[in-house]
Image (cartoon, helix red, strand yellow):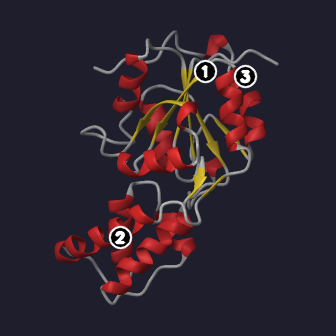
Amino acid sequence: MSRIPFDFIGFDLDGTLIDSSPDLHAALDYALKQMGRPVPTQEQVEKMMGKGIRRLMEQALEVTGGINQELMVKGFPLMLAYYKKHVLVHTRPYEGVKEILKALQDLGLKLIVYTNKPECLARPIIHQLGWDHYFSDIIGGDSFSVRKPDPKPLLEAIDAMGGGRTAFIGDSITDVKTGHNADLPVILVSFGYSDVPATALGADRVISNYQELIPTLASFSDDMMPDAVVKPD
């Protein structure tokens, strides 16, 4: 096996490690029906994902009749309360995720989740999937005062663990911006929620399944890599 020139791997969560769209769609369904609104299709919901649950609710209101602050004040708590109770009804890991997490950990890499999903939702999902021991840190969209595509939370977590060469894995333009804002190489999965093909988003590499991840990581030679992770200001 070729050497992997990284110390850390950052992962997005929804659309990258897990397919959570069915449970998010169900939560939207519940909240919108309480407000007398039609419900977007699951396909529409998937194209709205990636910028956090609050933004998902905003977009759903926008496409089902318009949005105002009063509707958000009413609808978002309904959606969030329902989703908190149903985070793993239909949500499933993508094929090969558990195996790749174990393989990367066995190779000595430290793994971090950096998601725009609130930490209070991300951690229970990861815990219930039995993945806690794979991740050195879990960073949610509410863990810091900034969120993706700002890379500062990820960089601070890596810096706290001693720093090192890092790659970021995701499925969306937000993930590409997150990695590239920190001068990190970005690998996108082609099976996530982006409404634009992953190959058109400017990532350094694109994979179609997790069996391709380790060879893809190894394809980054040492001379292509910065000496260390970019430190936050």
At label 2, the amino acid type is Met
Q: Position of residue 28 (x, y in %)?
A: 42, 74
CA gap, disc 1 and disc 2: 36 Å
| CA neighbours of label 2 inside 10 A, class few (<14), some (14 to 19), many (20+) | many
Instruction: Give the residue at the far bottom of this rendering.
Output: 36
Q: Which numbered disc flags the more N-terminal residue, 1 or 2?
A: 2
Question: In this image, 87 relative to 106: left or right?
Answer: left
At label 1, the amino acid type is Leu
Q: Which residue is mark 1?
A: 109
Q: Position of residue 4 (x, y in %)?
A: 69, 18
Question: In this image, 137 relative to 172: left or right?
Answer: left
**At x 48% / y 74%, what residue is drawn?**
26
Helix, strand or loop for disc 2: helix
Instruction: Give the residue at the far right of this rendering.
Output: 1
Helix, strand or loop for disc 1: loop
Residue 182, relative to residue 85: is it above or below?
above
Front disc: 2 or 3: 2
**At x 62% / y 42%, what residue is drawn?**
188
Q: Which residue is mark 3?
A: 218
**At x 55% / y 74%, what residue is drawn?**
42
Q: Position of residue 71 (x, y in %)?
A: 23, 77
Q: Which residue is mark 2?
A: 79
